[in-house]
Amino acid sequence: MRLTEMSVMGFRTSVTTFRRPAGGLRWVIIPTIHMGHADYYWAIWQRLRSCQAVVAEIWDGPSSTGMAYANAMRLARQRASRDLVAQDIDYAALGVPIIFPDDYLAPDASPDRRMSRAERLNATVATPILALHMALTGDRDWLARTKLDIDDQTEVVRDAGDVKREDLLLGVLREIDTEFAAEDMEVAVVFGALHMPTVVRHLAGIGYRVVPPEQWLTAVGYDEPPYLRKPTLDGWMDW
């Protein structure tokens, strides 16, 4: 099954519900990207309002990774850079239990949910490096060339940290399933898209199946199709 999709219109991510044939607990699987349009994150937040709990990646605040990529795309004059923001989903405002399996990796969030000084420094350092990399590719389609088409069979190269985070995530899913499998409730899983093939395969392995229809959210939209882009000799510098 498709989890994310890159097309001439932009980048979309899915919202998929899983349930066992006998009913009970429903999992709402939402793969995310760390940068996108503000209304993309608003749409995710709105979908989460019907859930009784959320299992989320890291912490309740803006993403320094998303900030770095969004700013780098603007510096490199990438075609899809218009109106991008860093991932920012206000989980606390949902008023339901939020579980961060990998919270030990996160910097402390300030009371007003502003990014910590360390996170902001990371974004500041990473931005020019990413922008240079994008600029040296020679055109405005860095996002389109990035491997963002992900399905449940996608094999992702993971380092030790990724494996640890996914182990923690699956451990939380097992605990919730053990305790609440028979309950008529929804639990959302909001994690980076590259972690979701592991999650989907795990749910399928313990008897969960997709409940149609799937929903699709546009994270990054193009203001023009790729075939209309302006041809250049020097890539981003003369656009």
Image (cartoon, rainbow, N blue to C red):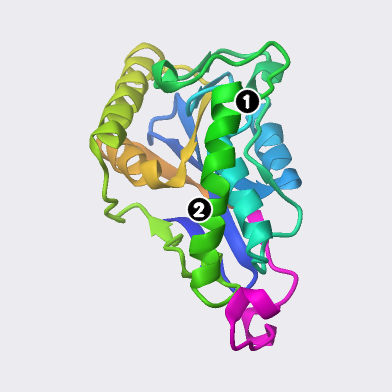
Q: Of helix, strand and loop, which one carries label 2?
A: helix
- Residue 153 horizontal/vertical position (percent): 29, 55
In-image side of 132 versus 110 (left or right): left
Above or below: residue 5 compared with residue 43: below
**Where is mark 1, residue-wise?**
61
Please count the marks in the image. 2
Asked whether residue 26 appears in the rendered view, the answer is: yes
Q: Amino acid at mark 1?
A: Gly
Around disc 1, counting alpha carbons within 10 Å, would you say few (fewer than 14), some (14 to 19), or many (20 or more)? many
Q: Residues within 10 Å of mark 2 (few under 14, many from 20)?
A: some
Q: Nearer the viewer, mark 2 or mark 1?
A: 2
Horizontal and vertical percent position of residue 228: 69, 85
Q: What residue lies at 69% left-to-right and 80% top-to-bottom?
A: 238
Horizontal side of residue 181 vs 130, given as left or right? left
Residue 17 picture location, percent across and down: 50, 40
Residue 66, by quadrant, is top right
Q: Tell me which segment is drawn in magenta.
A: 217-239
Q: Nearer the viewer, residue 101 or 184?
A: 101
- Counting from the top left corner in percent of width and height, residue 79 is at 67, 69
Nearer-the-camera pick, 161 or 204: 161
Residue placed most toward the observer, 239 or 83: 239
Q: Amino acid at mark 2?
A: Ile
Which residue is at 45% across, 24% downward?
A: 25
Residue drawn 47% across the image and 17% down it: 183
- The disc label shown at residue 118, or none: none
Question: Which corner quadrant holds the N terminus?
Answer: bottom left
Task: Identify residue for label 2.
Answer: 129
Magenta span has 140? no
